[in-house]
């Protein structure tokens, strides 16, 4: 009874307070209406005048986007201003008739009309849209004379981005495109909204994206007096924009061009690194694409062509293609064995041509085997059996630990793309990795038989070309690993100050000098008397290398016959190398998709790259033509 | 025939927990919103279509919540509150800094703003708490309730996000108020607050102080903090009795109103629709709040009464603070105009509130039985 009484009075309190609340709400809204009445009725004339006087508008002036040059100052991306003929659809009655009349004295092609239609669909009515870009001076003059006939049509100066070398190095440069909602979020995040007023384009990938906020520059403003309709009458004050900063790359564009040509129409990737700094000298992914196509918004036809192509030109294979390293894995396996003490250089094994594990037989490439094999021979002749046994003796944990230490299976953190998601991690196989990768318990278990094929760079192994190049550079540099980077320095346009991108050491691997020396000697042997010998015959410098062939799919029982197979099923060809051996200036990793044997299709590319970079020899042309660039480099290093 | 029958049953089933008056009032306010968002973003990326999509998601959330009986809602109270506090602590420790304030928590694929969760979790938690001690309510329970309120409040204020902290704090205070906090205490707190004002002044951030100073004299800083208020009052005042007409607001379309599709959208509406439009919008809000208070009055349990009352007063608070700040009688804090401002997250939160009101009302008979 008592309880009931209490809750009854509680309910009364509640209802009273609800009533009180209702009154308070009405009072508060009453105050608001009072305020509105004050502003909109009593003070209306005052505010109306103020709105009409509100005539000073800030018009943003878009800055010039920074220039990108290679290490020798060759321009790779630039901006230029050009006159465009623009139509504001909302101010023009009959669009078709207007365009027709304009076409009488200005050259307007069907593709100009198409682009105009496309841009019009994307834009708002009151924006002016270019019908013709890059007008000649004569065309500007002709239009100016006829201008009175065309209200709503005007000549404007706009900035255009241009990649003068077209498809060359497009995967490193990336491209710019129109700003999307997604990009707006990025701009918000960087607190750059104000600076992007008026900007229409933004870096979408590659360097253009990574260094967006360096390249963009500072937007200027013009204080303009406008009439009630929003039209500018006169300029009151102008704060000029500051152009974006310029990027100078570590890339040698001539080397890049030669390499891309060397690939021909084959798919693949090449990364060349300066081992002593981590500077990228060439970053190739073929096929390439023309970034100029994206600048004004890519046409649906071009986009479809690029996206639907089975060769996937938009994929940057150097960063996003993960491939089994094949036999290029062996020098690292050997170094790991020396470091953990599982092998000595002189220890020999007998290779009958196969290795039996459980009831499975792992076969060697060479029928009948290599006979008696020591570590040197195992690398020079690329003996599989040696590494089957070695992998079995070392165990997966030792292998994974060592390969992880040289950066395999990890993002390198190269300065391309906005964030690390632009780079693939690849797969460094280990029992932990398997546990994460698979869901079912029976799939999660690591079988020791799986370790065997890991030893020859097959199995679950999958690494990106940039990881392979970084590992090669680290070995060449005696265990000091640098983060790969493409930008050498940034020039601030305002002050002319150069901000160098300092080489960033990631780690120093504590390998015994005699071990490093031995592996390097064995790799020299590859290029002198082993699988790389033919490609490097007669080279005037000493180079070290290792060929590799990665299985695209496993052949069960049958023999591998290159010519009898479909091209897509052919093995990938790989080659890793560095030169000169005593003081390495360049380290490369090369991958040719479905190229067959590494010695055949990948090693000759390395020869071309080294010949140009070290000797200035241009393939097909007279040697020494471009030595000046190479000499400058050697002084810098 | 069977198909038609079962379709009809399914339809009846699916709208069984919708409260039609509440639905129509909010749809009307949202129609005003979409029309205004269209005008506000007319000169750039038009966001009206995207706001309609947000509405769809929000309405679906409302529908889901409305089917959740209040007894089940109570079970969420404590976990949701604890989750909210943990996330707020997470923001404090690892939050992503945007524009100098740490409000976001990155989950890798997306970012969340945990203070948004608190707008719901706070009244839910306190309503649950008072319901639990309904029969044995003592003064010390008010002390505990105050602690429940102050922890998230302090964490959000620290981000710093004073606007959201005040809204979350208000939502909690309404519950305590409806639970019967004695008037003596309320008046005492008010007096103490006034006395502490000089002290509060010293702990405010520079930009917060500036906003309050600007309110007192907007012309003191016409290009900085005062710009927003000056331009929005000009927009409202120049709108006059009947407005300048849809899409004809010069302040709006000549880019004088900042954040015009979010926090300052009321200036856009007011400029184009005038005093008549303002009165109509306030009338709609009054209907919404009236309906909410009716639902609270008819609610069968203490939990539902307190929750319904607090949610309803929450809507009032958002609307009042937003219109007050845009018209220059309250300082500028980041509070959107409910059901009108562009933005998906805020809309979903609001509609979860609407869904709760609907659930409370449509499940009340079941409780009595």
Image (cartoon, helix red, strand yellow):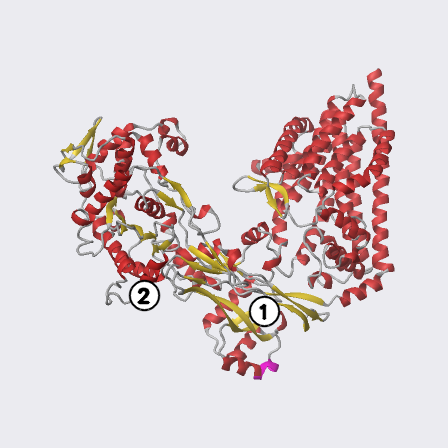
- The tag earlier along the polypeptide, 2 or 1, is 1
Residue located farthest toward the top when viewing the structure as drawn: A1
Q: How far is mark 2 from mark 1, CA to CA?
A: 48 Å
Whether residue B301 is visible, yes or no, is no
Where does the image place residue A96, in percent across and percent down from the top left?
55, 74
Numbered label tally: 2
Judging depth in this view, the residue of A574 and A94 nearest the camera is A574
Asked if residue A358 lies left or right of residue B248, the reply is left
Label disc, if present, on residue B130 of the rendered structure: none
In the image, which disc is placed on residue A628?
2
- Picture coordinates of residue B93 (x, y %)? 60, 36
- What kind of secondary structure does the magenta stretch mostly adopt? helix
**Quarter-wise, where is residue A399 in the image?**
top left
On the rendered structure, is A547 left or right of B204?
left
Considering depth in this image, is B85 or B324 the residue closer to the camera? Answer: B85
- Disc 2 packing (10 Å; few <14; some 14–19; many ≥20): few
> Where the C terminus of chain A falls, by quadrant?
bottom left
Part of the protein shown in magenta: A145-149
Place of residue B324 in the rendered image (x, y in percent of width and height, measured from the top left): 79, 49
Q: Which residue is mark 1?
A: A128
For residue A568, above or below residue B272: above
Is residue B134 among the parts visible in the rendering? yes
**Subunit ID for the residue under disc 2:** A
Which residue of the protein is positioned furthest toward the bottom in this rendering? A145
Q: Chain of mark 1?
A: A
Q: Quadrant of the N terminus of chain A?
A: top right
- Label 2: which secondary element: helix
Query: Is disc 1 surrounded by few (<14), some (14 to 19) or many (20+) residues within 10 Å?
Result: many
Q: Is residue A155 left or right of residue A422?
A: right
Q: Locate residue A493, reporting x and y percent.
A: 52, 63
Q: Is residue A341 magenta?
A: no
């Amino acid at each position: 009874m008592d309880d009931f009484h209490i809750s009854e009075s509680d309910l009364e309190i509640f209802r009273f307070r609800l009533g009180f609340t209702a009154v308070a709400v009405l009072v508060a809204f009453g105050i608001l209406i009072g305020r509105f009445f004050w502003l909109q009725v009593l003070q209306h004339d005052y505010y109306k005048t103020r709105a009409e006087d509100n005539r000073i508008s800030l018009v943003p002036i878009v800055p010039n986007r920074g220039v990108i040059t290679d290490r020798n100052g060759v321009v790779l991306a630039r901006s230029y201003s050009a006159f465009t003929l623009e139509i504001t659809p909302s101010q023009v009655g009959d669009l078709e008739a207007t365009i027709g009349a304009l076409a009488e004295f200005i050259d307007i092609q069907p593709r100009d009309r198409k682009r105009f239609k496309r841009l019009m669909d994307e834009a708002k009515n009151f924006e002016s849209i270019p019908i013709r870009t890059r007008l000649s001076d004569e065309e500007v003059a002709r239009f100016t004379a006829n201008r009175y006939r065309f209200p709503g049509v005007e000549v404007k100066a706009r900035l255009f981005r241009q990649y003068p070398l077209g498809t060359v190095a497009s995967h490193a440069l990336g491209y710019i495109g129109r700003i999307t909602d997604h990009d707006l979020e990025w701009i918000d995040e960087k607190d750059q909204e104000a600076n992007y007023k008026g900007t229409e384009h933004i870096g979408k990938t590659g360097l253009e994206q990574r260094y967006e906020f360096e390249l963009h520059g500072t937007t200027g403003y013009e204080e303009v007096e406008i009439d009630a309709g929003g039209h500018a009458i006169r300029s009151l004050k102008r704060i000029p924009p500051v152009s974006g900063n310029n990027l100078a790359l570590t890339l040698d564009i001539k080397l890049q061009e030669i390499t891309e040509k060397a690939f021909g129409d084959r798919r693949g990737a090449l990364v060349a690194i300066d081992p002593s700094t981590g500077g990228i000298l060439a970053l190739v992914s073929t096929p390439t694409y023309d970034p100029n196509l994206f600048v004004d918004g890519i046409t649906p036809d071009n986009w479809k062509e690029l996206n639907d192509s089975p060769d996937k030109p938009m994929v940057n294979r150097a960063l996003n293609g993960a491939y089994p390293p094949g036999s290029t894995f062996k020098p690292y396996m050997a170094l790991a064995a020396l470091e953990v003490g599982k092998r000595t250089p002189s220890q020999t094994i007998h290779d009958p041509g196969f290795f039996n594990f459980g009831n499975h037989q792992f076969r060697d490439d060479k029928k009948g085997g290599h006979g008696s094999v020591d570590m040197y021979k195992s690398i020079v002749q690329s003996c599989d059996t040696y590494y089957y046994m070695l992998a079995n003796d070392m165990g997966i944990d030792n292998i994974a630990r060592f390969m992880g230490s040289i950066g395999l299976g990890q993002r390198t953190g190269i300065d391309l793309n906005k964030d690390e998601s632009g780079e693939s991690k690849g797969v460094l196989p280990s029992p932990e990795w398997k546990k994460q990768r698979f869901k079912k318990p029976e799939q999660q278990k690591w079988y020791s038989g799986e370790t065997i094929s890991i030893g020859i760079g097959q199995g679950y192994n999958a690494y990106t070309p940039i990881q392979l190049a970084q590992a090669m550079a680290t070995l060449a540099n005696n265990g000091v690993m640098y983060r790969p980077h493409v930008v050498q320095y940034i020039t601030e346009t305002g002050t002319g100050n150069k901000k160098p991108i300092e080489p960033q050491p990631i780690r120093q691997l504590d390998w015994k000098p005699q071990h490093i020396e031995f592996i390097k000697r064995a790799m020299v042997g590859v290029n002198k008397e082993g699988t790389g010998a033919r490609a490097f015959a007669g080279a005037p410098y000493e180079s070290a290398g290792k060929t590799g062939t990665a299985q695209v799919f496993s052949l069960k029982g049958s023999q591998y016959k290159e010519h009898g197979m479909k091209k897509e099923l052919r093995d990938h060809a790989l080659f890793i190398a560095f030169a000169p051996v005593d003081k390495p200036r360049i380290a490369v990793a090369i991958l040719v998709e479905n190229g067959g044997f590494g010695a055949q299709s990948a090693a000759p590319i390395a020869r071309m790259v080294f010949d140009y970079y070290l000797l200035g020899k241009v393939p097909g042309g007279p040697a020494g033509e471009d030595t000046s660039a190479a000499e400058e480099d050697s002084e810098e290093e | 025939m069977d198909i038609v029958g079962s379709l009809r049953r399914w339809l009846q089933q699916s709208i069984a927990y919708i409260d039609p008056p509440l639905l129509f009032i909010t749809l009307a306010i949202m129609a005003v919103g979409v029309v205004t968002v269209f005008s506000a973003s007319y000169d750039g990326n038009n966001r009206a279509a995207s706001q309609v999509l947000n509405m769809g998601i929000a309405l679906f959330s409302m529908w889901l919540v409305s089917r959740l009986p209040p007894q089940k809602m109570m079970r969420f109270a404590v976990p949701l509150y604890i989750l909210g506090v943990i996330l707020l602590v997470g923001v404090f420790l690892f939050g992503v800094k945007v524009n100098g304030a740490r409000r976001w928590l990155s989950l890798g694929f997306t970012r969340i703003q945990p203070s948004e969760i608190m707008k719901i979790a706070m009244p839910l938690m306190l309503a649950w708490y008072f319901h639990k001690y309904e029969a044995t309510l003592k003064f010390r329970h008010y002390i505990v309730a105050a602690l429940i309120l102050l922890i998230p409040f302090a964490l959000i204020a620290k981000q710093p996000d004073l606007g959201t902290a005040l809204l979350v704090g208000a939502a909690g205070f309404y519950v305590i108020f409806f639970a019967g906090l004695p008037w003596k205490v309320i008046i005492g707190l008010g007096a103490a607050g006034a006395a502490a004002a000089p002290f509060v002044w010293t702990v405010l951030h520079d930009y917060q102080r500036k906003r309050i100073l600007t309110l007192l004299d907007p012309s003191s800083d016409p290009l900085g903090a005062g710009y927003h208020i000056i331009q929005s009052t000009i927009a409202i005042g120049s709108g006059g009795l009947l407005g300048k007409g849809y899409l004809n607001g010069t302040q709006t379309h000549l880019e004088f109103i900042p954040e015009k599709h979010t926090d300052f959208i009321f200036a856009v509406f007011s400029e184009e629709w005038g005093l008549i439009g303002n009165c109509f919008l306030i009338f709609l809000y009054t209907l919404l709040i009236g309906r909410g208070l009716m639902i609270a009055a008819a609610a069968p349990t203490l939990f539902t009464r307190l929750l319904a009352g607090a949610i309803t007063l929450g809507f009032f608070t958002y609307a009042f603070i937003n219109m007050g700040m845009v018209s220059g009688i309250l300082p500028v804090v980041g509070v959107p105009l409910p059901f009108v401002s562009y933005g998906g997250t805020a809309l979903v939160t609001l509609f979860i509130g609407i869904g709760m009101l609907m659930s409370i009302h449509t499940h009340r008979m079941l409780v009595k039985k």
